[in-house]
């Protein structure tokens, strides 16, 4: 088994593994970046209680990608557009765009992950280790 860098996080040479439930309890933020050692982008899990609505916010620099894992949310943008997302739903938001999220359920939590970054995509740079071949 790999070395544990923090309770609920297993770390090895160049990787870390955990579960969102290991990174916090109850509603609110689950910081992902620091416990796992991510340095290239921000990452948070958010657990919204039933019926809860976040405040509106925007960023100076980082764009964000939202991925809904569980529940049903409405995401509202600064232009008044509102979109409903179910499990597997995704939304990209530019830094300066105002956004807020509302849990549409009166009885269940909504769980989503937000990844934020700036300065763009690095392009396809994956390679196979020497001696490896594509599985068929």
Image: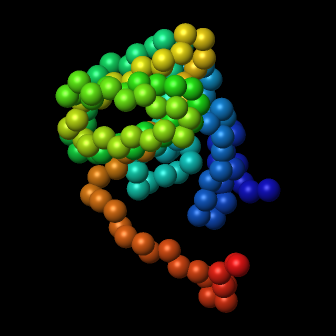
Which is nearer the eye, 64 or 69?
69
Would residue 114 appear left or right of 55 to someone viewing this image? right
The residue positioned 70% from the left and 78% from the top of the image is 135
Return the x and y of residue 56 as percentages of the image width and height.
29, 22
Q: Is residue 45 in view?
A: no
Q: Quadrant of the N terminus?
A: bottom right
Q: Is residue 88 in view?
A: yes
Q: Is residue 16 above or below residue 44?
A: below
Return the x and y of residue 51 as percentages of the image width and height.
48, 12
Which is nearer the eye, 36 or 59?
59
Q: Is residue 124 above or below residue 18?
A: below
Q: Is residue 35 above or below residue 100?
A: below
Q: Quadrant of residue 65?
A: top left
The residue positioned 66% from the left and 32% from the top of the image is 21
Which is nearer the eye, 74 or 9?
74
Q: Residue furthest bottom?
A: 131
Return the x and y of residue 115 as percentages of the image width and height.
42, 44
Q: Quadrant of the C terminus?
A: bottom right
Q: Quadrant of residue 91?
A: top left
Would residue 128 appear left or right of 7 to someone viewing this image? left
The residue positioned 55% from the left and 10% from the top of the image is 106
Return the x and y of residue 134 as percentages of the image width and height.
65, 81
Would residue 83 appear left or right of 33 to someone viewing this image? left
Would residue 67 appear left or right of 99 to someone viewing this image? right
Which is nearer the eye, 27 or 8?
27
Q: Quadrant of residue 60?
A: top left
How many marks are shown on the rendered structure?
0
């Amino acid at each position: 088994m790999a070395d544990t860098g923090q309770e609920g996080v297993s770390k090895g040479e160049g990787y870390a593994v955990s579960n969102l439930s290991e990174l916090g309890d109850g509603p609110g933020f689950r910081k992902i970046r620091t416990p796992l050692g991510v340095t290239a982008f921000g990452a948070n899990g958010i657990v919204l209680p039933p019926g809860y609505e976040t405040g509106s916010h925007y960023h100076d620099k980082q764009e964000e990608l939202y991925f809904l894992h569980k529940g049903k949310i409405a995401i509202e943008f600064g232009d008044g557009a509102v979109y409903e997302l179910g499990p597997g739903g995704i939304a990209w938001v530019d830094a300066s765009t105002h956004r807020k999220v509302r849990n549409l359920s009166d009885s269940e939590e909504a769980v989503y992950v937000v990844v934020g970054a700036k300065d763009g995509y690095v392009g396809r740079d994956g390679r196979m280790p020497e001696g490896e071949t594509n599985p068929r």
